[in-house]
Amino acid sequence: MLFSEASGRKVVSTSTAETLGQIADFVIDPQTRSLVALTVKKTDHGDTLLWSRITAFGSDAVTVPAAEAIFDADDAVAALSGKDHHPIGKRVLTTAGEDLGSVADVDFDPENGRLITLTLATGGIAAERLIAIGSYAAVVHPDS
């Protein structure tokens, strides 16, 4: 599933069937190359949904057990959140200094949150090559 497809998707409580908010952003841990949380907007419950608290990431909605699954970000999540850590639009540089283009989208597995591909205009880069995401660029290992 692509970030562009999942962005704006509703977050729904399975216990109350209440819409709790909408996905605003994705929090990536470059070390594990996976989503650790989602940033949620239009909610009264907080701004963060940990990946581990998601019941299912479906084609129409993300389900959680209850509103308490959404809370204000702790320091660990906040350190990986925000514009400086969002990959879309960032340059992709190899550790050898080669500019591969800009990230157009990110493909991830909705079952486990693992990143699959960084999508560029020129093609895809396997997420297993990802090292870090910063304010200017995403850094990847060179193609082997």
Image (cartoon, rainbow, N blue to C red):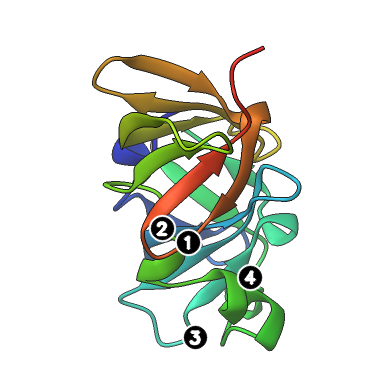
Which residue lies under the disc numbered 3? 45
Q: Position of residue 126 (x, y in %)?
A: 57, 21
Tell me the quarter of the picture where residue 103 sits.
top left
Separation of residues labelled 2 and 4 (CA atoms): 27 Å
For marks 2 and 1, the one nearer the N-term is 2
Which residue lies under the disc numbered 4? 66
Circle 4: residue type: Ala
Circle 1: residue type: Gly
Task: Please name whichever residue, 142 or 50, is drawn nearer the observer in this view of the structure.
Answer: 142
Q: Position of residue 123 (x, y in %)?
A: 35, 13
Q: Position of residue 122 (x, y in %)?
A: 28, 15
Q: Position of residue 73 (x, y in %)?
A: 59, 83
Separation of residues labelled 4 and 1 (CA atoms): 33 Å
Task: Please name whichever residue, 69 or 121, is drawn nearer the observer in this view of the structure.
Answer: 121
Where is the N terminus found, in terms of image quarters? top left
Q: Nearer the viewer, mark 3 or mark 1?
A: 1
**Where residue 86 is drawn, which disc sits there?**
2
For marks 4 and 1, the one nearer the N-term is 4
Q: Residue at the location (46% across, 68% down)?
A: 39
Specify whether residue 18 is in view: no
Q: Nearer the viewer, mark 4 or mark 3?
A: 3
Separation of residues labelled 4 and 3 (CA atoms): 10 Å
Separation of residues labelled 3 and 1 (CA atoms): 29 Å
Tag 3 and tag 1, C-beta contact below 8 Å: no
Tag 3 and tag 2, C-beta contact below 8 Å: no
Q: Is residue 11 left or right of residue 100?
A: right
Q: Is residue 126 left or right of residue 105?
A: right
For marks 4 and 3, the one nearer the N-term is 3
For marks 3 and 2, the one nearer the N-term is 3
Tag 2 and tag 4, C-beta contact below 8 Å: no
Q: Residue at the location (75% across, 46% down)?
A: 32
Which residue lies under the disc numbered 1? 134
